[in-house]
Amino acid sequence: MRIINHLLLGSCLLTIISCQPKQSTPATASTDSNAIVLLEAPIRDNVLTAAEQEALTPDIVLEELKAGNAKFTNNELTARDNSAMVRKAATGQYPKAVILSCLDSRVPVEDVFNEGIGDLFVGRVAGNIVNDDLLGSMEYGCKVAGAKLIVVLGHGSCGAVKAAIDNVQLGNITTLLSKIRPAVDSSNDYQGDKSSKNTTYVAHVTELNVLHSMEIIRKNSPILKELEANGQIKIVGALYDIDTGKVRFL
C-alpha cells in the first residue's frame, strides 16, 4: 500500500510540475552593432507618390541625398520590402533626382544615397560624360517626370579619366574619351606630374570633368537651363570616394 501511495504522490507531483508556466529565456541581444541596427530599423515598403514629389524642392532633395550618403557610410541602409515596392511602383514613377554616374561597378548609385525603387533616375556612362541621349534622358526626368535635382557624380581613380589623360586610341572608346579631353586640356595650370600615375592629378582632372559635364548640360539643354534659372531644379556636381564611400558635393 505504501508503494502505491508513493507512486500516486509522485505522479501528482509530476502533473503539478508539468502544468507550471515555463520561464521564457530572455532574448540575447546581438553583440553585432550592425545586426542591431537592421533589427530595429523600420522596413520601408512605400514608393514616392506624385504628391510627395510635388512637395519636394531641389534643396530638400539635396539634403536627403547627403543624409542618405551618411547612412551608407555608417552601414545604416534602410531595410526595404522590395517585392512590395516593385508592385507599388508598377503604376507610375515619381523620382526625386537624376544621377549622371560613371559606369564604374564600384559605385552602386542607389545604395550610395540610401535610395530605393522609384527614388532616382540613374544614367551611367564611362566618365560621366554628357551626350545628346543623356541630355534627352535628363530633360525627360526633370521636365516631364518632375525630378528636382541633377547630380553629376564622378569618382576617385576613374579609369575613363586616366585613359583620357593617356590619350588612349581604341575603337569607340576614343570618341568617348574625346568628351573628357576638355577637362584634361583645362588642367594646364596644374603644377606637377600630369600623368595617369599621379593620383592627385587624376583627382584634379576628375573634378574638372564633373564641372565640364555640368557646363555642357546648361549649354546644350535650354530646357534644363531654364528649369534651373526658375528654381525648379538644381544642377550640382559631386565626387564619390571609392575608399570611404563618402560623397563630396562641389
Image (cartoon, grey):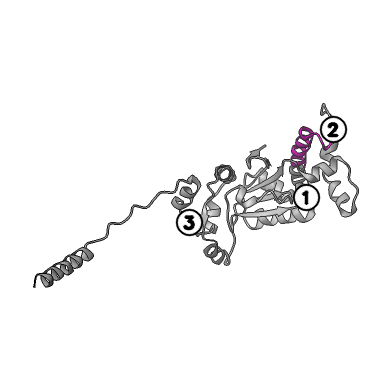
Counting residues from the start of the chain, the first of labels 2 and 1 encountered is 1
Q: Position of residue 103 (x, y in %)?
A: 74, 51
Tell me the distance, in whole angstroms, between the alpha carbons under discs 2 and 1: 21 Å
The overriding secondary structure of the stretch rendered in magenta is helix
Q: Residue at x 39, y 50 (%)?
A: 28
Residue assigned mark 1: 126
Tell me the distance, in whole angstroms, between the alpha carbons under discs 3 and 2: 48 Å
Image position of 196 (left or right of 103): right
Residue assigned mark 3: 43
Image position of 89 (left or right of 107): left
In the rendered view of the protein, which quadrant contains the C terminus?
Answer: top right
Mark 2: few/some/many CA within 10 Å (<14, 14-19, 20+): some
Determine whether label 2 and label 1 are within 8 Å by CB: no
Q: Does the magenta stretch include residue 41?
A: no
- The answer to which of 143 and 244 lies nearer the viewer is 244
Image position of 24 (left or right of 56): left
User: Which amino acid type corresponds to the residue marked 1 in the rendered image?
Assistant: Ala
Image position of 207 (left or right of 172): left
Counting residues from the start of the chain, the first of labels 3 and 1 encountered is 3
- The answer to which of 31 and 166 lies nearer the viewer is 31
Counting residues from the start of the chain, the first of labels 3 and 2 encountered is 3
Q: Position of residue 151 (x, y in %)?
A: 67, 46
Tell me the distance, in whole angstroms, between the alpha carbons under discs 3 and 1: 34 Å
Residue assigned mark 2: 194
Q: Position of residue 131 (x, y in %)?
A: 79, 52
Q: Is residue 196 magenta?
A: yes
Residue furthest left in the image: 1
Q: In this view, does 106 lie above or below 194?
A: below
Q: Where is residue 241 in the image (x, y as percent from the top left)?
A: 67, 40
Q: What stretch is highlighted in magenta?
A: 195-212
Task: Tell me the SS state at disc 1.
Answer: helix
User: Which amino acid type corresponds to the residue marked 2 in the rendered image?
Assistant: Lys
